[in-house]
Image (cartoon, grey):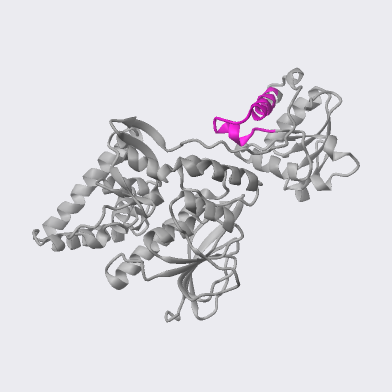
Amino acid sequence: MFSLNENSKVIIYGAATSGKIIFDILKKNKIDIISFIDKRADELTELYGKQVVSSIEDIEGIHKLDCIVIIAVKNVFEHSKIASKLVGYGIKNILYKPYTVLMGNGSKDEKRISECYDCLLNNEIRKLFDIPETRNIFNYQSDDWAFVREQDGWIWAKVPVCLIYANKATTKESIWANIPILAMFPHIGLFQSFLCSNSDAERGIEDYVSFCCEAAQNTGEIKITERWKQNVVHNRLDVFHNMDMAYELDKDFFVRNAPRAEWNEAGYFNLLGGKHRATFLVAKGDRYIVLQIAKEDYKKWVQKAGISELEKRLNYDYNGLIQKGIIEHPYFYRYPFDGESFTYLIWVHICNFLARYVFSKNHNFSFNSMTAFVSLEDQGYIARNFTRIGVKVFRKTENRPLEENISEVMNVVAAHYLEKEDSPKVNLAIVEDTIYENAQFCFLVSDLELGEMKENYSVEVLFQGTISSQKKFLYLIANKDRNL
C-alpha cells in the first residue's frame, strides 16, 4: 500500500492538459513533483520549472522505485498500457484508470486505484491513502459480450462480421452461396454507393445489377429488360432508405429483425436470410451484427470448456505493448489488443480483393485451390479467416502456442506453421515491413511510405490507420510475374 501526501515525491506521466490539471492540484497541496514524462521531451525539456523526460529511465538523482507515478493522459484507455510499461521498470506506486474497471469489472484493488484516481482529480487528497501497489497490472475477466437476449430456444447475439457467411449452397445460386458476407462486393458496393461513401459509386450499382442478372439467368424464369434493371435499383434504394432511417433513429430494429443463422462446423455462421440487412450494416462500418441463433448452435460456438485456460494464457502473456490482433470469440471481444480496427480492415480489404479477383478469373467463389503465407502478429486472426474460406495457410509467427490455443477454442485449425526460414511460393502473402517476393500478390503492412519499386512490382495503397499511435499503411503489391 502507499499514500499520496506532503511527503510524497511524484512523477507525472503526460505533459499536456491533463498533466497541467494534476500539476496544479499537487502544487496546491504542497506535494513535490520531481518530473514529467512525455514523448515530446525533445521539444519541451522543461515545463513549469520541472524537467521533462521521455522515459522513466531518464530520471536521475532519486530512488525511482519510491516515487508515485500519476498517469495524466487524456485517453484513459491507454492508462493500463502505460502502467504496464512502468511496472516493467519496477515501478509499483501508480495512480491511473485501470482498463478492466472502465470495462465494468476489475479486481478489488483495481477498483480502489480507480477510485483514488477520481479523488485526486476532485482534489480530495485526504482520501488518498491505502492505495494498492500495482503488481498484477492486468487480469482480464472474460464475460459473454455477445449475448443480447434469449427467448423460446433462440439466442440473439452480436456476431463478428468475419464469422457471418451467406446461406448454404442451393442448386440455383451455388456460386454466391457459403461465402463471407465481406466477399459480397455487389451488395456492399451498392449500399456504399447509396451512402456516397464510395468514390466509384457507379461501379457499385453496376456490380449489383450484374449480380441480379446472373441470379435471374440461373433461375431461367425472369425476363431481363432495362426496365427490370431500373426496378431492381429502385427497390433496393427504398430498402436502403428504410434501413438507414432505422439505423439512425431505431437501432433496436436490427435486433428485432435480426437475421437467423445456423452454425457451420467449419467455424462460422450461415445466414438463413437477411443478407441485405447484414451487408447494409457492413457498408455502415459495423464490426458486429446481431443474429438470431438456436441455443444449441450458440453453445457449439462459445465452447465454455476452453475459455478458462485461454484466459489464463492471455493474462500470463499480456504486457500491454506488443499484443496486437483480434480474438473473434464472445468472451474476448473486450480484451485490450492493440490495433483491432486496423487488423479487421486488413481482412476487409483482403476479402474484397479475393472475391473480385477469383470471380473475374473463374466466375465463382471457390478459394480451395489458393495458398497464402501469413507473417503478421495478429493472434492468428487472418490465418483463421483464410482457413474458413478454404485457403491453405503457411504461418510464420513468434506466438505459435497462444495461437494454437485460440484456434482450438475457435474450432479452426488455422495454419501449417513453418519451423524454418522456408519461403513457399503462394498466391497471397500478408507480411510486415518486408515484401514477400514468392507471392503473386503481397499485402504489406508498414509504417513507411513506399517510394519507387522494382520494375516487376506494382503498388497500391489500400488504406492507412494507426497502431499504438503509429501510422501504418496497408499496401497491395502485385508481382508482374503471375506464373509464381
Residue at the far right in the pictured view: 61
Q: Nearer the viewer, residue 238 or 43?
A: 238
| Residue 106 is a magenta residue | yes
Any magenta on residue 291?
Answer: no
Q: Is residue 261 above or below residue 376?
A: above
**Residue 111 shows in the view:** yes
Apparent side of residue 120 relative to residue 266 in the rendered image (left or right): right
Image x and y of residue 305, in percent: 48, 42
Q: Where does residue 278 sit, x and y in percent of width and height? A: 32, 46
Q: Quadrant of residue 376?
A: bottom right
Residue closest to the eye, 187 or 335: 335
Describe residue 256's horizontal placement relative to residue 484 as left or right.
left
Q: Which residues are magenta?
A: 96-119
User: Which residue corresponds to the image point at 60% horizontal and 72% vertical from the top-left?
Assistant: 421
| Secondary structure mainly formed by the magenta segment | helix
**Which quadrant of the figure has residue 361?**
bottom left
Quadrant of the rendering where the N terminus is positioned: top right
Left-right relation of 137 to 102: right
Q: Residue furthest front?
A: 305
- In the image, what residue occupies the spot 73% across and 19% down? 127
Residue located 70% across and 40% down the image: 83
Does any portion of residue 318 appear in the rendered image?
no
What is the total number of numbered labels drawn onto the structure image? 0
- In the image shown, does 140 or 11 lie closer to the viewer? 140
Q: Residue at x 55, y 45 (%)?
A: 310
Residue 329 pos. (x, y %): 46, 45
| Quadrant (top left, top right, bottom left, bottom right) of the C terminus | bottom left
x, y percent for residue 430: 51, 65
